[in-house]
Image (cartoon, rainbow, N blue to C red):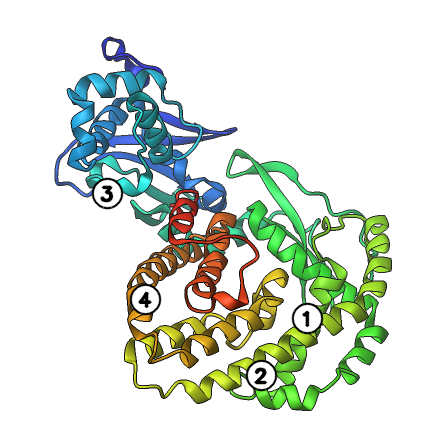
Amino acid sequence: MRHGAEAVTADWFPASLDIGAVRLPLTYRFEPGHALDGVTVTVPLALLNTLPAWRFDWLVPGMLREKLGWYVKALPKQLRRVFVPVPDTVTALMDTLTPTRGLREALADALSKKSGLKISVTDWHDTPSAHLMMHYRVVDEQARELGAGRDLLALQRQLGEAAQLTFREQDNAFEKSGFKRWEFGDVPEELRFTRAGQPATGYPALVDDTDSVALRLFDTHAAADRAHRRGLVRLFRLTLQVQFQFLEKSLPNFTRLALAYRHLGDADHFREELIQAIAVRACLGDDELPRDQRQFEAQLSKARARLKPVADALLHSVAQTLDEYSQIQAKLKAPWPHVVKDVQDQLAHLVYAGFITATPWAQLQHLPRYLKGISLRLSKLPARLDHDQRHSSVLATLTSQLRTRQDKHRKAAIDDPALNLFRWQLEELRISLFAQELKTPQPVSVKRLQKLWENVLP
């Protein structure tokens, strides 16, 4: 931003906001209490999904000063008193802060550097007044308003599908369907063109159409990556149809495992879940996603060699998991409500319909140990009831903040590796607290998890 207090000019209230190569018009209304008080940005529907929410938190320079002042004053008292007088602190911030990431993250780091204290985004528990939040107005090609409000993520959820369709509708020449082999040329990572009179970038991907794959254009890299991964797996399964048909018919101990799974889903659902998990791991694993036929053919060779060992490893883990799960169910009538409630919640997030494909491959291998840990915890009661109760409250706090942040990230379509790491380290903490004899791959403690939480996206 780099504006001193003496340098207030018309640039502080610009007529438009540039985000990359996109220029979005701004309008202002300074009327306290009015729904449009503050600054409004007009967003074409076709570009709605492409815009980063964090950039709008910076508003415009002329309003950023007041917003920074609000954040400094909203700090807990023991931190806030370090930054008085607040106007001087804000002036210094205006000279140094630049909109290269989220405002709160940048502000927390700047205040930490200035004071020598550790200040985190979690130190702010409230949100600024409405006029210090960007107001969004989403319009169609005829400038008709389709939605408005101060929550960009909510508007993206509400209008995101329509935005994606509008973004794609002029690219029918690129989008094709009905492929069962790689016979459509390369799939570039990006395509550049114009949308709603603005430069835009599209992200091509293969899409799973069940009995074939199609080429589609997406408005965000994340959405394209998710679709391309699923589309590739479908194409591998179609190309290796004979191998997968044989695999479906020869899954060892399938009937016994399907019976153990029956409370989660029927046998057909269970078989498809197993095959899909095998396909994802054997055909893609942790490798780079193919985007041309040469890469795809090279990956096919790897997939053929991986199919059996991957299937064997998966079925071994699933069998152990379902066996442990069944044993736990028989112990859940124990007369300790706080334990039963906690275990039921833990189980619901470990073993559920779809867990085989939803659980990362590395963690699938640890599921039997996590469930064994639950069994040991229950077996040690009531002799260790005091120990259990003492640690349960800490676990409840950590679990609650995890679930809340997971829900927020899910709604915003955020995939945060730091949150995923925290989620699985929480399972390791349970092992450390209740079943130490099972051991953990690395040291884990409440303090270590609290430190990990500092890296989780807000």
**Residue 213 visible here:** no
**Disc 3 designates what residue?**
127
List the residue tagged with mark 4: 392
- The type of residue carrying mark 1 is Gln
Residue 426 quadrant: bottom left
- What amino acid is at disc 4? Ser
- State yes or no: discs 1 and 4 in contact (Cβ < 8 Å): no
Which residue is denoted by mark 2 in the rendering?
323
Of residues 368 and 389, the one drawn nearer to the viewer in this rendering: 389
Q: Nearer the viewer, mark 1 or mark 4?
A: 4
Q: Residue 402's x, y, as percent?
A: 38, 57
Give the image location of residue 334, x and y in percent.
35, 86
**Disc 1 target residue:** 276
Marks 2 and 4 close (CB-CB < 8 Å): no
Residues at discs 1 and 2 in contact (Cβ within 8 Å): no
Q: Amino acid at mark 2?
A: Asp
Instruction: Give the Cα distance between marks 1 and 4.
Output: 36 Å
CA separation in Å, label 2 and label 4: 26 Å
